[in-house]
Amino acid sequence: MKKLNTNSNAYIIIYSTVLVVIVAFLLAFIYQALKPMQDANVALDQKKQILNSLNLRNFDDVKADKTYSEVVKEMKTAKGAVYYECNVDGKTKYVFPLKGMGLWGGISGYIALDDDKNTVYGAYFNHEGETAGLGAEIKDDQSWQEKFQGKKVFDAEGNIVLAVVKKVDNPDSQVDAVTGATLTSNGVSDMLQNGLSAYADFLKSE
C-alpha cells in the first residue's frame, strides 16, 4: 500500500480546503446559534436608548424591558419615518430616532419632545467611534445631554433652529458644543436639523 505523501502539493491543498470548510461550517453554526441572543440584545439596547431620551435611565435589563412596555404606547410613521408615541407620568411625549456622521464614523440618537411638538423633553446620543473624552462625550456625558431639555425646535417662522453651536446666541434653541469636539458637535447639530426635518409636517400639524 502506497504511503500517503503529506508533503505533496495535492495533500496540502486538500487538507487546507477541508480545514477551511470545517471552520466555515463551525463559524456559520455558531453565528446562527447566537443570532437570536444578539438580536435580543440589540433590541434591548434600543429600548434603553429610547428610555434614556425620556429621562428614564439606569435600569437593569428586566426593569428596562418592563418600563419600555409601559411607557412606549405605539410606534408610528410620518411619511415613512418612524417615531414613537409615549406616555410619561400621564403626559404624551414623542420620540424621534436620528442618524448622522461624527468625526470618525456614524452617530445616532433619540430626541424626545413634549406634546406641543416643539419643546425638547430629553435627548440621548450614541456614536460608533468618537474620541474618548472628546467627541465620545455626546454619549458619556449625561449632563451635556440634559442641556437639550426645554430647548425649542422651531422659531416663530417655523424654521428648525435646534442646534449645537460653539457660541450660544439664542439659549432658547441652542446648546453649547462639546469642548474640544467641534466636528462631532457639528455632526450632532446637522443630525438634529436633517433628522427632524423628516418629521416637519407632523411636528407642525395640530
Image: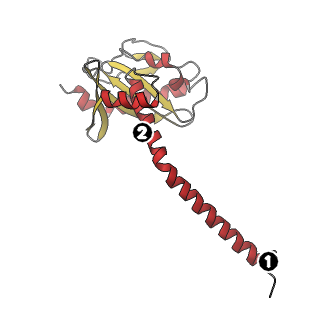
The residue lying furthest to the left in this view is 206
Q: What residue type is labelled 2?
A: Ala
Q: What residue type is labelled 1?
A: Ser
Q: In which quarter of the image is residue 203?
A: top left
Question: Which residue is depicted at the point 55% across and 54% down?
Answer: 30
Considering only vertical position in the picture, is 155 above or below 71? Answer: above
For disc 2, the marked residue is 43
* Label 1 with label 2: CB-CB less than 8 Å: no
For disc 1, the marked residue is 8
Horizontal side, residue 57 vs residue 16: left or right: left
| Mark 2 neighbour class, 10 Å CA radius: few under 14, some 14 to 19, many 20 or more | few
Quick one: quadrant of the N terminus?
Answer: bottom right
Considering only vertical position in the picture, is 129 above or below 206? Answer: below
Secondary structure of the residue carrying tag 1 is loop
Secondary structure of the residue carrying tag 2 is helix
Q: Can residue 9 be seen at all in this image of the molecule?
A: yes
In the image, residue 9 lies at what x, y percent? 77, 76
In the image, residue 75 lies at what x, y percent? 29, 36
Horizontal side, residue 35 vs residue 121: left or right: right
In the image, residue 39 lies at what x, y percent? 45, 44
Q: Quadrant of residue 182?
A: top right
Question: Which residue is depicted at the point 62% across and 65% down?
Answer: 22
